[in-house]
Image (spheres, grey):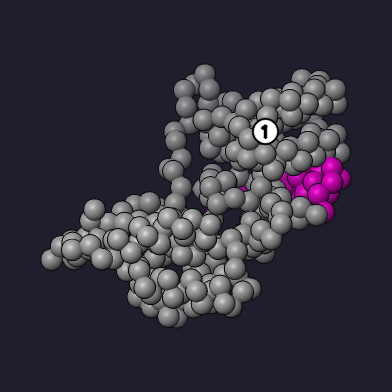
Amino acid sequence: PQLLLVELFPFGRRQMRFELLPLLDAARQAADRPLIVSSVRDVLGGGQKDPQRQQRMLELFDRYFDHVLVHADPSLVPFERTFAHVPELGARLHYTGYVVDPLPDSGTSATAQLGRGEVLVSAGGGAVGQGLLETAIRARGLTRLSGERWRVLAGAGIGAPAFAELGALARELHGDGVVVERNRADFTQLLRRCRVSVSQAGYNTVMETLQAGARAVMVPFAGGSESEQTLRASVLAERGWIDMVPEHALTPASLAQAIDRAADRAATVPGSLRFDGADVSAALVRRWLSQHKA
């Protein structure tokens, strides 16, 4: 290959080093050595407070990698917030802006109004968001938006029994005022039309929410030693772009209060942020490859 692009490693994916290190050794020793590039998100998920682990990240990067693509905007979350050795990376570090699919058009006339004015509740594809979905259903009656339709989207990680329980709870408390369904392909369109979005704070969801200009409440996942989502959501809350409810403080009442606050906020797209990270990444890779061949 001309290019070996590795997600997160050596800044993450430690559990995969048993197969990544032999791959990197083989690439480095190849007669026609490929470019080796690491691709990371805005916030590292672990090792932020472990100096030895951070030093090991730098050593592995120095040994194997030519560049690192950081899919973020340094004006919002500079890489040094979670990686201590940014000065040592020097010109090998490249910010691309955020990677997010372009917003689709508004849809056909038959679907263009679907979701308009709703409260949209989502939790990604995993099972860890079930508690958030249930809490949101219970919070509806406590908000000023209790008369609006709420749409609760459950990911594939929530099994059939739990999905059925969510539907039963919604019907019991709210009749047909809450729709419980599986994740939808038109999620970003629903984001653009909703009154308020309620979600966790994973990279993809956050970027889609910001790009859509949706008023948002975020409940960052904080299980175990996870700090990635909390840092990401905290930075946005400090800017006044979202309302945040820490996972440990999540109750129907606290969520309802945050939803009411978000509903009063103007819906704006942060104009200073770049969402063309995919195009920028591709352009950088093309340039490096042309230089590498030369």
Which of the image's four quarters has the C terminus? bottom left
Task: Report the magenta stretch's main SS.
Answer: helix
Residue drawn at (74%, 29%), measured in percent from left and top? Answer: 162
186 displayed left or right of 255: left
Q: Is residue 235 visible?
A: yes
Q: Position of residue 178 (x, y in %)?
A: 75, 26
Q: Is residue 224 above or below residue 133?
A: below
Q: Quadrant of residue 104?
A: top left
105 displayed left or right of 128: left
Q: Is residue 7 inside the magenta stretch?
A: no
Residue numbers of the magenta segment: 249-269
Q: Quadrant of residue 127?
A: top right
Going by the picture, which residue comes out furthest to the left?
Answer: 294
Residue drawn at (25%, 66%), measured in percent from left and top? Answer: 29
Q: Position of residue 181 (x, y in %)?
A: 66, 26
- The foreground one among 118 and 45 is 45
Q: Is residue 65 above or below residue 111?
A: below
Q: Is residue 283 visible?
A: no
Residue drawn at (62%, 59%), measured in percent from left and top? Answer: 228
Please state which amino acid type lies under the numbered disc 1: Ile
Q: Residues within 10 Å of mark 1 (few under 14, many from 20)?
A: some
- The foreground one among 222 and 213 is 222
Q: Quadrant of residue 142?
A: top right
Q: Position of residue 138 (x, y in %)?
A: 83, 35
Q: Is residue 267 inside the magenta stretch?
A: yes
The secondary structure type at the circle numbered 1 is loop
2 displayed left or right of 250: left
The residue under label 1 is 158
Q: Position of residue 114 (x, y in %)?
A: 59, 25
